[in-house]
Image: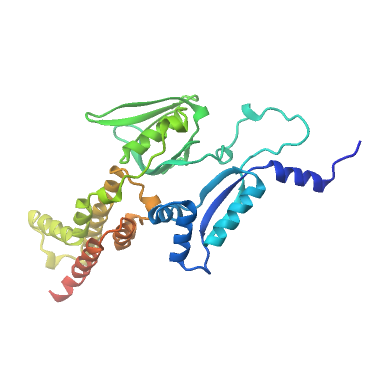
Amino acid sequence: MTQPTQSNVQQNHLLEQTYKVVLKGLRSDVPVDTAKKRLAALFKASQEQVDGLLASGDYAVKKLLPHDVALKYQRAIGNAGGVCELVVDSPFFTLDVELPNPIGMKEKPAAQPLDDTIIFQGDVTLIKSYLKIVEGDAVGTSAKFVFVGDKNGEIVLLPDDVLSVSEEKHLFVGKKWVVRTRTGDAYQFVAANKKALSRAMLALSGKSTAAVGHHADPDILAIKNKTAWLAAIGPTLSGVIVLLLGAALDWNFESLGTLHLVQLWLFKLSIVYVLLRVDYLSIQSQGFNPVKLGIASPQQGPLYLFSRAKALGQSRAYAITWSILFALEVAGPLFL
């Protein structure tokens, strides 16, 4: 009996494996605007959708493709100005022998099925008790829900490990999602983006992707900017709050030492940050995914507001206002 050669086995593997085409970014030798326009035409998508795909990081354009078809997609995207790579889309190779059924095998989270369409992404609060909560980030896909922020490490929840998922009352008016696992653990989650979190929780409970439906950001033209303007006047508002607090406590600012002045500045900066974060959460509560849109985090100060304006196609007036007021707040004491 003729034994298969190594090259023949490798060729069979290549033919039988499936691949996903992952968009990594844009080619450096093609103008950015040109590449985006070509990709929009290739994907039959809008410019905003292409910007969202690029901002989301590695994005699987196509999945479960034979190697030759995946190569065609890779060439087409490359010709348009994109950079992509082919990633094996199946954890198993098929040979001309009978292999054990892998369905009952338990895999590590990283080796879960690759149909990881993002359903939820954003800020999440893990409620451990009425007095103990953990603020963190989470990503919910059609294959898992991952919470990052707990001191004990990532919490990775897989549908096969979940006993039940239910929406329950939280305090007097709120709602929370409670996930109970087969090992006896229970996790309680709330998020500003309630609709997307609901879809992620339903997917975790075993609902099919078709039944759950993918979360789609609403029209950016409908976004409300009240909290953005509140954040824009944050530098001045923080100063007013400090003055009112000083008057209430009868502080003598001229006699304050260096340490106390530094503490006051840190307090003012914390107010500025809180107002930026309030706007960041407001964006999520309106159904948007800031990460997907390419909006910077509130920790980045003015860059957050500038990236917000760019991602939403708005005027940079609130970002410029923030920058001017912050500069005046910093320079003001020098002229007193």
Task: Name which residue lies at 8% across and 54% down.
Answer: 248
Question: Coloring scheme of the render?
Answer: rainbow
Does residue 231 lie above or below 60 as drawn? below
Instruction: Describe residue 17's horizontal placement relative to residue 199 as left or right.
Output: right
Q: Is residue 146 visible?
A: no
Task: Name which residue lies at 43% across and 29% down.
Answer: 211
Instruction: Describe residue 196's horizontal placement relative to residue 262 as left or right.
Output: right
Instruction: Describe residue 282's horizontal placement relative to residue 182 as left or right.
Output: left
| Extreme residue in the bottom direction | 335
Q: Is residue 165 visible?
A: yes
Q: Position of residue 72 (x, y in %)?
A: 61, 53
User: Foreground: 112 or 259?
Assistant: 112
User: Foreground: 235 or 5?
Assistant: 5
Which image quadrant: the N terminus?
Answer: top right
Q: Position of residue 136 (x, y in %)?
A: 38, 44
Task: Name which residue lies at 58% across and 37% down.
Answer: 108
Q: Position of residue 116 (x, y in %)?
A: 50, 40
Q: Position of residue 115 (x, y in %)?
A: 53, 39
For residue 129, what is the image quadrant?
A: top left
Does residue 328 lie above or below 113 as drawn? below
Which image quadrant: the C terminus?
Answer: bottom left
Q: Number of callouts in the render?
A: 0
Does residue 320 lie above or below 163 as drawn? below
